[in-house]
Image (cartoon, rainbow, N blue to C red):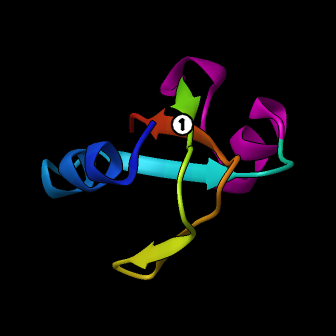
Amino acid sequence: MKKEELIKLLKEGVEIFATSYESEKDIEKALSINENQIEYLKQYDGDDFTYNDLEFVDGDSIYKISK
């Protein structure tokens, strides 16, 4: 996934969770949500950047969160 794709999703209001090391189970616990509310999208491939206080690092796994 490229930076432009991530920014497009964020501008559309999609809630994104990016992590380099946490599993889906870790995300469920951290956000107090169910497994069916997490959707793996892609791995981020690009330069590290910050957007609206969210940090994205090359190699992060990108998840869509539905609440």
Determine which quarter of the picture holds residue 23: top right
Q: Is residue 41 above or below residue 10?
A: above
Determine which quarter of the picture holds residue 43: top right
Magenta residues (range) = 23-40
Residue at 26% x, 54% y is: 10
User: Front-most of 13 and 5?
Assistant: 5
Question: What residue is pinned by disc 1?
Answer: 63
User: Front-most of 29 and 50?
Assistant: 50
Q: Is residue 59 above or below residue 7?
A: above
User: Front-most of 45 and 29?
Assistant: 45
Residues packed near mark 1 inside 10 Å, few (<14), some (14 to 19) or many (20 plus): many
Instruction: Specify whether 6 is left or right of 20.
Output: left
Residue at 82% x, 33% y is: 25
Q: Residue furthest bottom?
A: 53
Determine which quarter of the picture holds residue 51: bottom left
Magenta stretch: helix, strand or loop mostly: helix
Identify residue type, mark 1: Tyr
Residue at 70% x, 47% y is: 59
Where is the N terminus found, in terms of image quarters? top left
Residue 31 falls within the magenta-colored stretch: yes
User: Residue 33, how many percent across, how many down?
Assistant: 60, 38
User: Residue 57, how many percent across, how many down?
Assistant: 64, 62
Residue 12 falls within the magenta-colored stretch: no
